[in-house]
Amino acid sequence: MVKWTPKAESDLDELREYLADNFDVETAIRISNELIDYTENLLSLYPLAGKIFEPNPLFSSFVFQGNVIYYCENPQDKNIYIIYVQFRKQQFSEDRLEHDENVWNNLS
């Protein structure tokens, strides 16, 4: 099962807001829904589809329409968690993918 962390959901909200401000609301809704659908379909079928994030191999990523989606599998419940959605106009935030011994406790 693919799950979105609260921070990843917040990233989606920021993406929608950016698109609505710079294009229009319909475009914002369409693109964010496409990103969600693509992500959930891809990772449900192929959980190893992404590229391993070299600085922290707990995480993998893939690109959808210029946006980078970072995710990991929780070894305890075997769910795939979307951790970070870096949209194309956003600066990469490395601290979002730092190793934390409590990482699995912080996913929900």
Image (cartoon, rainbow, N blue to C red):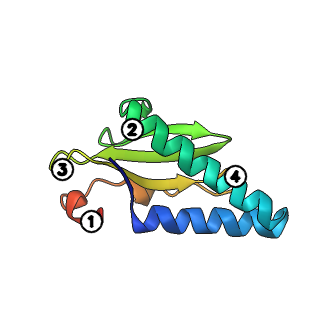
- Res. 55 image quadrant: top left
What type is the residue that disc 4 sits on?
Ile
- Between circles 1 and 2, the one closer to the viewer is 2
Q: Which residue is mark 4?
A: 31
For the residues labelled 3 and 4, the Cα–Cα distance comes to 30 Å
Residue located 63% across and 47% down the image: 34
For the residues labelled 1 and 2, the Cα–Cα distance comes to 22 Å
Left or right, 20 with respect to 61, comes to right
Residue 20, can we see it? yes
Mark 2: few/some/many CA within 10 Å (<14, 14-19, 20+):
some
Percent x, y of residue 33: 62, 54
- Res. 48 image quadrant: top left
For the residues labelled 2 and 3, the Cα–Cα distance comes to 14 Å
Percent x, y of residue 41: 48, 39
For the residues labelled 1 and 3, the Cα–Cα distance comes to 13 Å
- Between circles 1 and 3, the one closer to the viewer is 3
What type is the residue that disc 1 sits on?
Asn
What type is the residue that disc 2 sits on?
Ser
* Count of all numbered marks drawn on residues in the image: 4
Q: Which residue is mark 1?
A: 106
Residue located 52% across and 69% down the image: 10
Q: Which residue is mark 2?
A: 44
Residue 53, can we see it? no
Most extreme residue toward the right is 23
What type is the residue that disc 3 sits on?
Asp
Left or right, 106 with respect to 17, comes to left
For the residues labelled 4 and 1, the Cα–Cα distance comes to 28 Å
Q: Which residue is mark 3?
A: 77
